[in-house]
Image: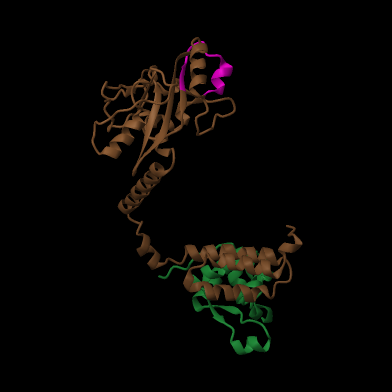
Chain colours: A green, B brown
Amino acid sequence: VALEPKLSHTAAIILQAVHAGHVYGFSVMEMTGLPSGTVYPALRRLERDSLIRSHWESQSIAGAGQRPPRKYYKLTRSGKVTLEASHKRYPLLVRLIPAPEAENA
Amino acid sequence: MTIPRWLDSAPVHLAILRAAELLVPGSRRVDWFAEWRAELLYVKQSRTIFCLGAFWDALWLRRNSPSPNARRTFGLESPFRCVLFLAALALLSLFFAFRLPFARDMLLPSPYRDPANLVMISADGQFRAQIPTVSIAQYRSLANRMQSVFTGLAFYLPTQTRVQTAGFSVALASRNLFDLLQIPVTSHDAGRIVDPEQPSLAQVLQRRSRTGRPGDSSGRATDPGRRSDFSEFLAPPGPGRCVAAPGPATPHSTATRLQRIRARPSPRSLQLPTGHLRAQ
């Protein structure tokens, strides 16, 4: 039986924010109100634990917007499972940061 | 938190990110800096505080990105290697401590039996001088006047003598110097009494150097100021010193003006060299 990693409240909030479509660091900061010194290391930790994965925006899209490419984050399958488990532990998480599919439901 | 205006500028933000970048493991620096720089473009307020958060991120990466190369370089995971490394550091520190001026004398035990009660006497206001500040005449005057204050008073003055290729230092000292310092001195090492009828050691050295014949000496001392209460011997160079041992009646005001001998490195130079020149 695979053990699901238990997330801290902060990590769960950040994971929920990424799931809700706040896919880059500063967006997560704005959504959660957490400082940069908390959000970015947490993103690294979640990525190390394979709960999220990152990818760089393509140069053509960034070039069209006359800005440098951004790094986006996305939940992995494992991340989704862990997040669902976290919802049981932190029931207010979904209401705090509603995901698009939850809003549409 | 209020940030001064000059700190909230693009060059400062860039400098902060560059400084934090140094903490990031080399293989991840480019990506890391690119991400932070790109994110910074979207930050409208408190940009400096946002950038300061980069240090936490960089530190996390550093702590959680083990570098196999670094492990191989230091190899300090083993307790034995760690102890070995500390021992090497201690040896290196000792080496440098002994090479530093005065450190050797501070580390080694004093050659005198009672250094706590020995003091150097310097001219008023010259306590830290590294050159002689008390003349022989002053010493004699002090010796006469301060008998009630000190149990003894001695004088020591090395003078540099150049003999062709080699440099020697002939020290002139009062004859009670070794008694005062309680240094055991054999009669062989006791030096020679300064006698106006005999050449000075410097003259003997110079003559030997010229003739190449050891033991050949002649001539007369030309310094009429020398007296038989002084002796001279070969010694390492160092500043002249008037040394005294305070007695029970030493006034406090005087004692506070005297410099403790332990604080000065020169007493070790009072030791007689083993290659002492025999008196003719």
Q: Quadrant of the C terminus of chain B?
A: top left
Q: Nearer the viewer, residue A32 or B78?
A: B78
Residue at 53 percent across and 62 percent down: it is B59
Residue drawn at 57 percent across, 65 percent down: B20
Q: Is residue A64 above or below residue B38?
A: below
Q: Who is closer to the viewer here, B171 or B202?
A: B202
The answer to whether A12 appears left or right of B41 in the picture is left
In the image, taking residue B53 as reference, residue B80 lies left or right, namely left
Expressed as whole percent of the image width and height from the top left, the position of residue A36 reads 63, 66
Q: Position of residue B26 (x, y in %)?
A: 48, 70
Quadrant including the N terminus of chain B: bottom right
Q: Residue at x 36, y 63 (%)?
A: B73
Q: Residue furthest front?
A: B219
Is residue B251 part of the magenta span, yes or no? Answer: yes
Q: In the displayed structure, would residue B232 be above or below residue A67?
A: above
B54, above or below B162, in the image: below
Residue A7 visible in rendering:
no
* Residue B70 falls left or right of residue A26: left
Pick the residue in front: B66 or B136: B136
Location of residue B111 (image quadrant): top left
**x, y percentage for residue B173?**
40, 23
Q: Relative to A91, is B277 above or below?
A: above
Is residue A21 visible to the viewer in this orientation of the structure? yes
Q: Quadrant of residue A42?
A: bottom right
**Toward the viewer: B84 or A57?**
B84
Residue B249 located within the stretch drawn in magenta: yes
Quadrant of residue B269 within the rendered picture? top left
Task: State the extent of the magenta-drawn residues as a range.
Answer: B243-258
Question: Which x, y percent locates residue B50?
Answer: 66, 66
